[in-house]
Amino acid sequence: MIRRSSKRSEEGHLDRWLVSYADFITLMFAFFVVMYSISSVNEAKYKLFSDSIRFALALPSPPNTPIVSQGTAPAPMSATGQQTIYLNKVLVDKHTAQLGEQQRKIEERMKRLAHGLSRVMEPMIRQNSVRVDLTKRGVVVDISASTLFDTGEAILHIDSMPVLRAVAEVLGKEELPVEVEGHTDDLPIATPRFPSNWELSSVRASSVARILMENGVPEKRLSVVGLASNQPLYPNDSAEHRARNRRVTITIASPNLDRD
């Protein structure tokens, strides 16, 4: 009895390789089914997806070459793909036109602002004590410090008040940020009130900003900075150049399209 049972057990072990072989065949069949399904491309959906991605990323459209599966002949572009390209082109053209129109309005707005400031500051411009420039940054107004303050002081002259009030009236009609910067020459100063040019330039800028604020420019739109002698217009190599470097600059920042 024992010998007969052992023989049956050995025959059962010899047939176990069939199980592994069947599993291997099943896996190979599943693998080829998956590979075949991946190789089938829906041209219309692929083109629509590709065009949408390119439009979202603002990439240039590729040549009109249809997607072709390996082993098949080229096919003409589908109607869906053509409609998508046309729609994307219309949207891009419309967006570009809108940006161009906004930029044109901004430039006209800044030109009007520069003209308004030049008009109210015309007497000082004729005396070469004020300069109004239209730059990429915005409208920049450079005012000579000698027309605003005594040497080494930060108290505004009485006769400069009307002009600054007129400037504040023009700026009060806008909603743009206003930056007031104080600048000095490279000659050092050391007084109890102004230990260095940093303090002098900062207080001078603050004095001008306060007049603007008291005459209609909202405080939240104003920023003040003292730059001492670090941003000269001319080399500090003569009395005339030093006088030009001593100034207060008012910059009305141009609107940012991304922000607006």
Image (cartoon, grey):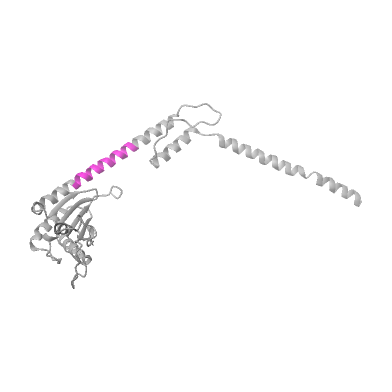
- Identity of the residue drawn at 47% across and 33% down: 44
Q: What span is colored magenta in the figure?
A: 92-110
Q: Is residue 223 above or below residue 33?
A: below
State left or right for residue 145 relative to residue 34.
left
Q: Does 103 appear in magenta? A: yes
Quadrant of the rendered image containing residue 171? bottom left
- Identity of the residue drawn at 42% across and 34% down: 62
State left or right for residue 37 relative to residue 114.
right
Quadrant of the rendered image containing residue 224? bottom left
**Predominant secondary structure, magenta span:** helix
Q: Nearer the viewer, residue 254 or 7?
A: 254
Q: Is residue 61 above or below residue 143?
A: above
Evaluate whether residue 172 shows in this view. Answer: no
State left or right for residue 185 relative to residue 160.
right
Q: Nearer the viewer, residue 145 or 103?
A: 145
Q: Residue furthest front?
A: 237
- Identity of the residue drawn at 66% across and 41% down: 27
- Residue 129 image point, x, y percent: 12, 55
- Residue 246 image point, x, y percent: 17, 60
Q: Residue furthest bottom?
A: 192
State left or right for residue 30 relative to residue 169.
right
- Residue 118 image point, x, y percent: 13, 50
Q: Nearer the viewer, residue 251 or 220?
A: 251
